[in-house]
Amino acid sequence: APGSMSGSGPEAAQPSDAAEVRQQEAEQDWAAAKAFYDNLVSKRPRPPKPQHAITVAVSSRALFDLVEERRIYEEQGVEKYVEYQQNNENVTLKPGPAFYFVKALEHVNARLLELYPDDEERFDIVLMTNNHAQVGVRLINSINHYGLTIERFCMTGGKSPIGYLTAYLTNLYLSADSEKVQEAIEAGIASATMFTANKDVAYSDTQLRVAFDGDAVLFSDESEQIVKEHGLDRFFEHEQLNENKPLAQGPLKGFLEDLGKLQKKFYAKNERLNCPIRTFLVTARSAASSGARVLKTLRSWGLEIDEALFLAGAPKGPILVKIRPHIFFDDQMFHIEGAQKLGTIAAHVPYGVAQKYHKSA
C-alpha cells in the first residue's frame, strides 16, 4: 500500500539517521587524527579513542600537592595565584593523593602494550581542572619531570569541568573538590574526593592495588538504609531473607567491571599469577550473617574480586595498612579518616544514606 512507504522518504529518515551521521563524522575525525599520529616519528603510544579506553579524569589538586597554591588563591585571589604559578613554573610540584594511583595505571598500560600492541582497551588519563590555561605550563613541566603520560588536558578557567567529563566518556573522576565530586556523582559519573594520607607509605610499582567498600560504593545503599533506620538485627534478618537477590549496583561498580575486563586480558595470556591489577573488597559486614549476599551479587554480575575482607564492624585502617592500596574507596568519612591516619590514600564517594547522617553529625 502506498501509505506503508510514507516513513521511508529522505525527509522521514533524517531524524533517525542524525546520530548515525554524527557517529560517522566522529569516526572520520579519529581516522584523520590516527593518520596524523602515525606519520609522526615517536615512541609514545597514541592516546586511545575514548569509547575504547577506560578514561580516568584527575584534577590538578588530586594529582599534585597544591595546598600552598590553594591558600594563595583563597587569600589573595585569582590574579596573584596565576602570577605565583607563572613565577614558579620551573619548580616541580610534589605528588598529590592521586599521583601513585596514576603511576600504577600507567604501569598497567605499559604491560598491556607489551601483550597487545594494537589494542586500545587501556587507561587514558585526562587532567581535568578548572585551572587557568596560564597555570598549564607548570602542570606540564611537573608531568614531564615525573615521566607521566598525560596527553589530554582540559583547563576550564574557573568553569565547572563536569560537562567535559561526559564529553570525554569518563569512567572515573578524582578531585580534591567535594562539591565537584558531588556534582559528578549526580550526573551519573563514578567519582570520589581524594584525601592525602597522614603518613608516607611505600606503594607497589608493579601492581595496581584498588580497595573498595561494599555498600554505597560497589553496591547500592539499600542495606545501609535498613541499618540506619531499623538497626543491625533487622539488617541481618533482611540480608538472610534476600541472600539470593542481587544488590542493586552502586557508583563504583562500573570501575570494578573495567578493572575486571583488563585483568581478563592478562589471564588470556597466561599472566594470572603475574597480573598487575589486584582488587580488594573491604567491608564492615560480617561474613556469617551478611556476607553471602555480597559474594552472590558479584557472581551474578560476572565479576571477580581478588580478596574479600569481612571485618564485622572492626576498624578498616589496620587491614588497609597490610593491603597498601593505591586508593581505597568508601562512602563514610569515619572510615576515610581512620584509613588516612594510618597512611592509606582514601577517596570519599558521596553517595547514599551515609551522607545525610554525616552532614547532620
Image: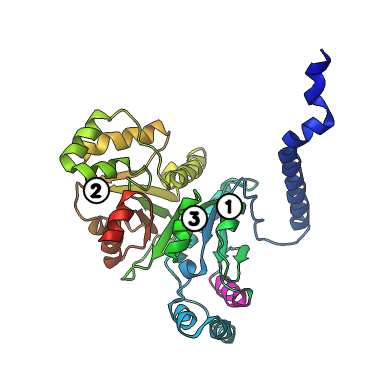
Q: Nearer the viewer, residue 145 or 61?
A: 61
Residue annotated with mark 2: 284
Per the image, label 3 sits on a secondary structure element best described as helix
- Residue 328 lies in what quarter of the image? bottom left
Can residue 206 be seen from the camera position used here? no
Tell me which segment is drawn in magenta: 134-146
- Per the model, the C-alpha gap separating discs 1 and 2 is 33 Å
Kind of element beneath mark 2? loop
- Residue 184, disc: 3
The kind of residue on which mark 2 rests is Ala
Would you say 141 lies left or right of 17 here? Answer: left
Please identify the quadrant where the C terminus is shown.
bottom left
The amino acid type of the residue labelled 1 equals: Thr
Q: Is residue 84 above or below residue 136?
A: below
Which residue is the site of mark 1? Answer: 166
Q: Are marks 1 and 2 in contact (CB under 8 Å)?
A: no
179 magenta-colored: no
> Residue placed at 58% from the left, 87% from the top?
87
Q: Residues within 10 Å of mark 1 (few under 14, many from 20)?
A: some
Counting residues from the start of the chain, the first of labels 1 and 3 encountered is 1
In the rendered image, residue 138, in percent from the top left (x then y), is placed at 58, 77
Image height of 71 relative to 177, above or below: below
Q: Earlier in the sequence, mark 1 or mark 2?
A: 1
Q: Can residue 207 be seen in the rendering of this structure?
A: yes
3D distance between C-alphas at marks 2 and 3: 26 Å
